[in-house]
Image: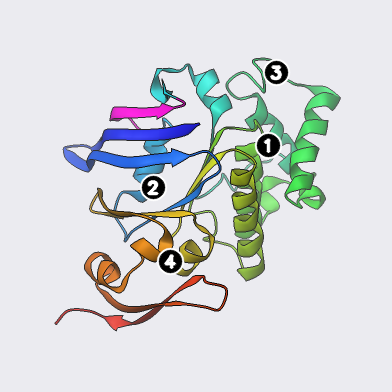
Amino acid sequence: MSLEIKGLSVARGARKVIDGLTLPPFAMGEFAVIAGPNAAGKSTLLRAIAGLLPSSGEITLEGQALHGLSRAEQAKRVGFMPQTLESRSALSVLDSLIVAMNAGGGLTGRTLRGPAAARHALEVLERFGLSDLAMRPMAALSGGQRQAVGLSQAMIRDPQLLLLDEPTSALDLARQFHLLSEARKLAREGRIVIAVLHDLALAAQWADRVVLLEGGALHAAGAPSEVLTPDSLSRVYGIDARVERCSEGRVMVMVDGLSGP
């Protein structure tokens, strides 16, 4: 299974945020990170893949055009975790997962209700260590708890492609580790997982591949050690950075200051 993106363009009004973007194919089992400075097009790219923004070009999963699928079929194959979840909802966490599960026709084209729906939702919450939040109202959750629940919602239909938009922005260090380790496990189980991350240290630590965007275009794509180089970071971010390997072979990014005059 692979995800291919060719000639993708996305416009906001008269301005093209992404213009003719082509990326190397994403492979099954891969955890990829989209990185880049503000306004590079990272979240726009993710939302376009998810079918949440109008776009032109080709986006195919297993050779099938994603945007040619019905909303129900697309919802079964693609899970999307937004940057923020609705914080004022009176729904419980459990009910929010059931609603997400039945959106677009349910798990297999049928709507689950009653005990069967609750049982499946509880199984997903248990996998991500969130069983204790099941009956809590969404409005009562902290920002970090809402992000953790967002991953559960995105996984409720067991998609082939999982898209995570800044999934760690409200998480403490322990929850960052837990969420990213789960994301990589989900990839290893035979999915494609793509996350937008601002923290380059996290990208270097967890990603199989980093896709570095600049101004809506591809700057570089490859293993973290190939992409997160001092030269690339200086050109894209305008920073002086050292890129070093720790004893386990992981890449560490350390910023010394701003580059340029």
Query: Can you tell which mark lies on residue 81?
Result: none
Magenta span dominant secondary structure = strand
**N-term-proximal mark, 3 vs 1:** 1
Query: Can you tell which mark lies on residue 96?
Result: 1
Q: On the rendered structure, is 238 left or right of 160?
A: left
Q: Position of residue 138 (x, y in %)?
A: 68, 46
Q: Secondary structure at mark 1?
A: helix
Hey, which residue is sitting farthest left in the picture? 261
Label 3 sits on residue: 111
Q: Residue at x 65, y 52 (%)?
A: 182
Residue 244 position by quadrant: bottom left
Q: Which residues are magenta?
A: 53-62
User: Number of numbered discs present?
Assistant: 4
Instruction: Give yes or no for residue 132 being in the magenta stretch.
Output: no
Closer to us: mark 3 or mark 1?
3
Residue 180 seen in the figure: yes
Image quarter where the C terminus lies is bottom left
Q: Are marks 2 and 4 in contact (CB under 8 Å)?
A: no
Residue 76 position by quadrant: top right
Q: Nearer the viewer, residue 249 or 217?
A: 249
